[in-house]
Image (cartoon, rainbow, N blue to C red):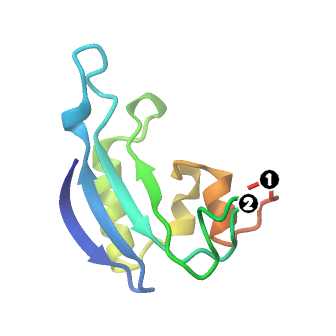
Amino acid sequence: MKVIERAVTPDGVEIQLEDWSEHNSAEYPELYGLTIGAYPTAQRTGKYRLVEGGRTFRLTIANNAYAGYTNEQVKTDFELLKTGKKVLGDLSMRFWYGEKDMWYLGMAVLNNGY
């Protein structure tokens, strides 16, 4: 993994644009690509305390060519996060752990045993 750029959103969340394409194989040439790594402060504590309220945790927003989320879209979303035109919640449908990450962020989703 190579970090392309680091930034801080206007609301103080550290983010970085990462390139994971070196992990691709001949069999799966588009499996990995650009990813946004974000480090927001959790609003809730997880069941096993791997994520604790009041502390930062890693939130991943990765490209997914198979679901139609391209590297170009990841780059655009990174730029929009940097400028504040988007916030992490706007990208919740792209969170790696879906509703679990949403729950950690304090968004209105049910706790399904997180």
Position of the C terminus, as image quadrant, is bottom right
Residue placed under numbered mark 1 in the picture: 113
Pick the front one: 113 or 20: 113
- Closer to viewer: mark 1 or mark 2: 2
- Residue drawn at 70 percent across, 69 percent down: 107
- Counting from the top left corner in percent of width and height, residue 28 is at 31, 20
Give, as a three-letter code, the residue at label 1. Gly
- Counting from the top left corner in percent of width and height, residue 52 is at 62, 72
Query: Quick check: marks 1 and 2 in contact, CB under 8 Å?
Result: yes
What secondary structure is found at the residue carrying circle 1?
A: loop
Q: CA distance from mark 1 to mark 2?
A: 7 Å
- Counting from the top left corner in percent of width and height, residue 102 is at 64, 61
Residue placed under numbered mark 2 in the picture: 47
Outermost residue to the front = 48
Pick the front one: 57 or 61: 57
Give, as a three-letter code, the residue at label 2. Lys
Q: Residues within 10 Å of mark 2 (few under 14, many from 20)?
A: few
- Residue drawn at 76 percent across, 67 percent down: 108
